Amino acid sequence: MRVNGKLWNTRLISNRIATGLPLAFAGILAAVPLACPTRAPEPSVRRTESERSRIRDARADDRRVEPSQPDVPPSLPDATQVASPTPYSRAALPILDIHTHVDPTATRTVLSLFDARGIHTAVNLSAGFEGAGLEEALAQQRESRGRILPFCTLPWRATGHPQFVTESVRILERCRALGVRGLKIPKVLGLGARDIDGSRLRVDAPRLDPIFAAAERLGMMVLIHTGDPKAFFQPPNPQNERWEELQAHPSWSFYGAEWPSFDEILGEFERRVLRHRRLVFVGAHFGNAAEEPDRVARLLERAPRYHIDTSARVPEFGRHPSARMRAFFTRWQDRILFGTDLGLGDDMGEWMLGSHGNERTTQRDVDRYFSATFRYYEANDPEWENPTPIQGRWNTHPIALPRDILAKVYGANAARLLGITWPPPTQ
Ligand SMILES: [Zn+2]
């Protein structure tokens, strides 16, 4: 993750040494290359050149984040985002966004965007863990009066260490003691994380079971991203429907013998969910299978505490006909959580709107992103541009959800899982 790259790693190690973590484990954390999966922007604090270069290194190791352009001056969001005149620029009902990545030092900028767009509460999935960023995320939770909530992560770089699981359980217990309600598991599990013997650590590896058992015991929900769009597992060439995105980010391709197939990894994910029936799971990105709503529905049928989020997949599930998706949302109206996958800091040019190319994000991109997103859920248009064109130059088919279903998907379902009063009293 951009925020906590090697800087957080270094702090983590010194913290762990100070708190008595076995040196060998700390050594592994130092030695294993970063494979951070999330995309919170770099904090806007002043950094030395060597710190900046370490962050750039960390970004280069991150499958989802390209090196930044340090010479480009930051662009501040302009006033039109506060008083945007475009239709559907603000959600019709208050939103609880279950899937964001937020710079803990950019609270004011982020809240002004949220206020302009009707997002009341958001979960920051890039919050790290104690000694590795969680303190800053908890400070942001206080500063935002509970509007930006952290979920913890685990040291996924260290999965090859024999003590990874016991240490992860301890980290989770500390997270819960500090008031955190959920754990985010990134796609590096299944696509990069290594087992003790160096083989690929599978999403359903029995060795990891104690982590999920601990989450269940502690009453924490687990939001899990497995795999990626199907197209990323297919040959990266001009025939690939996500060619534009793969050209901007060649490292997002998982095509080839060294990678598992989409079906293999999705099968591992499904077995993991079915193994822990009392645990509240959230399958990120439309259950990690926006291309196949019927497959998503089968898992929802079999696992009663399983939920899905909608983040970064309106362009994908929005391709299906309106009637089909309206029926899906109607049937699963209590199990779908609104998410964006926004990556937000003080520099709008670096904002992540579900995905991004190599160009800096503009106000126009931001306006289009929100109006196309809200339009998908709320409008009756036969078709409309999708919120994130780099994910595919096709239109979506808006589904005009009835207000009671919209209220659940936009916020009430997630609020129920998180124990938050909803709708929020200030709305
Ligand atoms: Zn994300």
Image (spheres, grey):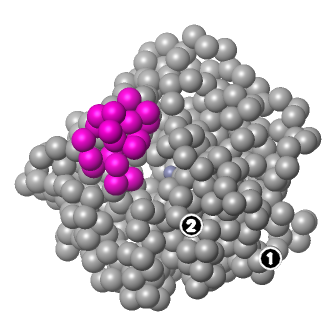
Q: Position of residue 377 (x, y in %)?
A: 70, 64
- The magenta segment is 229-247
Mark found first going from the N terminus, 1 or 2: 2
Q: Are marks 1 and 2 in contact (CB under 8 Å)?
A: no
Give the residue displayed 42% in from the left and 76% down from the top: 294
**Residue hosting label 2:** 321
Disc 1, SS:
helix
For the residue carrying disc 1, how many other residues have a C-alpha within 10 Å: few (<14), some (14-19), or many (20+)?
few
Disc 2, SS:
loop
The answer to whether 328 is drawn above or below residue 42 in the figure is: below
Q: Position of residue 400 (x, y in %)?
A: 74, 69
Mark 1 to mark 2: distance in Å? 20 Å
Q: Position of residue 320 (x, y in %)?
A: 52, 64
Would residue 243 be counted in the magenta stretch?
yes
Give the residue displayed 31% in from the left and 61% down from the top: 167
415 vs 196, left or right, is: right
Say which mark, if any, is on residue 403. Answer: 1
Residue 216 or 416: which is nearer the viewer? 416
Amino acid at pointer 1: Arg
User: Is residue 177 visible from the viewing direction of this image?
Assistant: no
Give the residue displayed 72% in from the left and 22% down from the top: 75
User: Is residue 248 visible from the viewing direction of this image?
Assistant: yes
The answer to whether 330 is drawn above or below residue 262 in the figure is: below
Would residue 281 be counted in the magenta stretch?
no
Residue 360 or 114: which is nearer the viewer? 360
Using the rendered view, name the quadrant where residue 351 is placed: top right
Amino acid at pointer 2: Pro
The answer to whether 74 is drawn above or below residue 213 in the figure is: above
53 vs 151, left or right, is: left
